[in-house]
Amino acid sequence: MTRVVSKQLRDAVEIAWVCILQCELDAAIALLDEKYTSGTGGEAGNYILGRMAHHRIVITWPSAGSYGIAPIVRVATRIHHEFRNIRFCLLVGIAGGCPNPRDNARDVRLGDVVVSTPEVNRGRGGVVQVDMGKHTDSGFEIHSHLNKPHPDVLNVIPLLRNDHNYNGRRQMDEYIDEVVKRSRTTPHLRQFTYPRNAPDRLFLSAYEHFPHSYPDCTYCDGTKVWARARRATTQPRVFYGTVGSANNVLRSAKERDRLHREEGILCVEMEAAGVMDTLSCLVVRGICDYADSHKNKAWQPYAALSAAAYTKDLLTYVTRASSSLVHGPHCLLGTVPVDEVDQALASRPDEFVQDVERLVGQMCDIQLHFFDQRLVIFQRFLHKYGIRPAGHWVEDGNHIYDGFNEKRATAVIRNMHKPPQERLRAARAYAFINANKVKYASTFTTHDTVLRIAEYVHSR
Ligand SMILES: [Zn+2]
């Protein structure tokens, strides 16, 4: 059902998620924590508003049947005008990989994820337009490099990488597993199961697909395949580097290898160039083929899901906009599942109790207007113990959601900007808290997850 989107909801949206293909859209919607409403805009594309992790996001896509960069530019422009608080855009979908079977550190495989990140030494923003450049005596020289992704996203990537690489913490795998699990009872999600029937084979670059009209590689010569070491797990690997954006489908192993060798490009897609100049954009791509003559669609849905799952994982690290950037009344409330607190407590009892004590100290030391810092500290704590910030996130002037029951605890973290009629009450609360820092903790005990967790842990 299409509803008129309230101005308040529109203004609360800070992140745009752009996708093109049906399977990319299906993956994004499958990972939404809440779906609010949808809208249509003819040529300017359609959208869905929802919540993913603690963010309000708009998922948008061009109208059916429109291809190429122009429709993407229209979608990006419309989003930019209609949602004035959009901080950055995520372009999430599939791409052809540029593998390097000789170098394990750069050997992208089907289902892996490539994230566009700036390469400082090359002076690039993470995405290059591979078909814009000039022919010189030494070959084709790319000279177009596009906008860098927004710092709010770039700055949290190291934290996420640290968790992925050293702390064994990858929420993206859980997100993928959840969708696959749901697919057993939800037919339209079945496309997302791991494509075991379409083995990941990288053919030698000189070997062409045969016969050309045949949709898959049943008749291709299995001896013309790179012998790559098996990986210990099917979980997607994540690569960071340069994404190539082209106007035409790349279907040439020779050109793909050249782009990788000369430009360090990890994958090639077709839409980023259309968005980058309008919105600050992070490109996240799941690898669905090797951009050669053997390319087919078997891996597209799974690759779309792995890219979407990575992006959701990343979003849990991104804080909401600082209070000065947020328009209108916002009071962010979050909840955590108590059974996850129980699990964390059971797994490392002493450390967990110490961390809760430290957290209470940190949260109470910080003055009210540094709520963003509190959010970061709180999120780090949740990450460490695998507690997912889930459940109700409400923005609603003075009304603090009282969500504490056997299953959930409530947090209030965020700015105290209020509409005029509510400012007096906010000002009173602010003055009270500033004047009573010692009592601050008890004042907010009823509404603060941290203190709730502390109480809860001590009651065990
Ligand atoms: Zn083939």
Image (cartoon, helix red, strand yellow):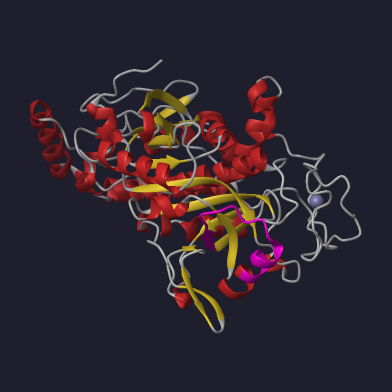
Residue occupying image coordinates x 80% and y 43% = 214
| Magenta span contains residue 377 | no
Where residue 215 sits, quadrant-wise, is: top right
In the image: residue 307, left or right of residue 185: left
Residue occupying image coordinates x 65% and y 25% = 182
Residue occupying image coordinates x 61% and y 59% = 165
Q: Is residue 373 above or below residue 414?
A: below
The answer, for residue 332, to whether it is visible in the render is yes
Segment tinted magenta in the rendering: 242-258
In the image: residue 130, left or right of residue 204: left
Q: Is residue 439 above or below residue 163?
A: above
Residue 55, x across and y down, in percent: 39, 38
The residue most toward the bottom is 137
Residue 46, x across and y down, in percent: 40, 30
Where residue 253 sits, quadrant-wise, is: bottom right
Residue occupying image coordinates x 75% and y 66% = 101
